[in-house]
Image (cartoon, rainbow, N blue to C red):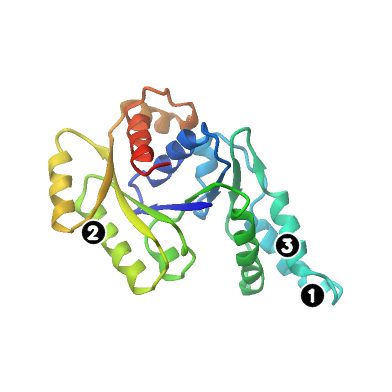
Amino acid sequence: MKVIAITGKGGTGKTAVAGMLIKHLSSGKKTLLAIDADPDSNLPDVLGVKVDKTIGDMREFMLAERDRMPPDTNKEALLESKVYEVLTEMPRYDMLVMGRPEGSGCYCFANNLLRGIMDRILKNYDLTIIDTAAGLEHLSRRIIRDVDELLVVTDGSRRGLQTAERIRELAKSLNLNIKKMHVIANKVTPENRAQIEEYARELKMDIVGIVPFDETLARFDLEGKPLADLPVDSAAFLGVGEIARKMGL
């Protein structure tokens, strides 16, 4: 079992990279779980997957029903059954969308139950890819922890790499048990590649791979087409495939 989380500054193409990585890895023999942990929930659209319910909906259910349940109700088993209800099964991978709570109130009760359930679910898969929220909050709140590989997506800006540096330092200071961290440089052009590599050297950041700017991907994004339909000779798709190979995936 291996867990890979993908994060980065907003606008760097984090979810697009996650979607292309899932497209690559779903063609192999490993069992794969894709998790959208971003409250904006864009990963299903990127992959062309229709999702009707989220884990956020199940948290709402547990919060609403908690006080009406018989005292001997096994609440963890009930929530686990509800989580499996929202598991979307695709031909080559499964997907869970975390979503966001819609109501008010404390979700500590449901969230505490959910942590143990998610640990058990992840053990059913060879590989789990988690598309996280942009920024640092998911790390500071310890939502993302105990992962094998943390991939930080940056663009051609110094700010993107500075965000990667802050993520690296925060992960260390909070002892989040992240075994390896890599940086992916996305939307790279021949004109900005040398500058990005220089920024990375200055900040002592390990760039695991380069994803070139891709007109086809940009058109798909503009037209709202799922990146799952990208042609296999897409420059960005090939770049993500090379990164997967470098990481031994």
Q: Which residue is mark 2?
A: 162
Q: Which residue is mark 3?
A: 79
Q: Amino acid at mark 1?
A: Asp
* 3D distance between C-alphas at marks 1 and 3: 14 Å
- Residue 195 is left or right of residue 135, and the answer is left
At numbered mark 3, what does the secondary structure look like: helix, strand or loop?
helix
Viewer-nearest residue: 104 or 78 = 78
User: Is 18 drawn above or below residue 100 in the view shown?
Assistant: above
Residue 209 image-quadrant placement: top left
Q: Position of residue 34 (x, y in %)?
A: 54, 46
- Mark closest to the chain's N terminus, 2 or 1: 1
At numbered mark 2, what does the secondary structure look like: helix, strand or loop?
helix
- Residue 103 is left or right of residue 19, and the answer is right
Q: Amino acid at mark 2?
A: Gln
Viewer-nearest residue: 203 or 36 = 203
Q: Position of residue 228 (x, y in %)?
A: 49, 31
Q: Which residue is mark 1?
A: 67
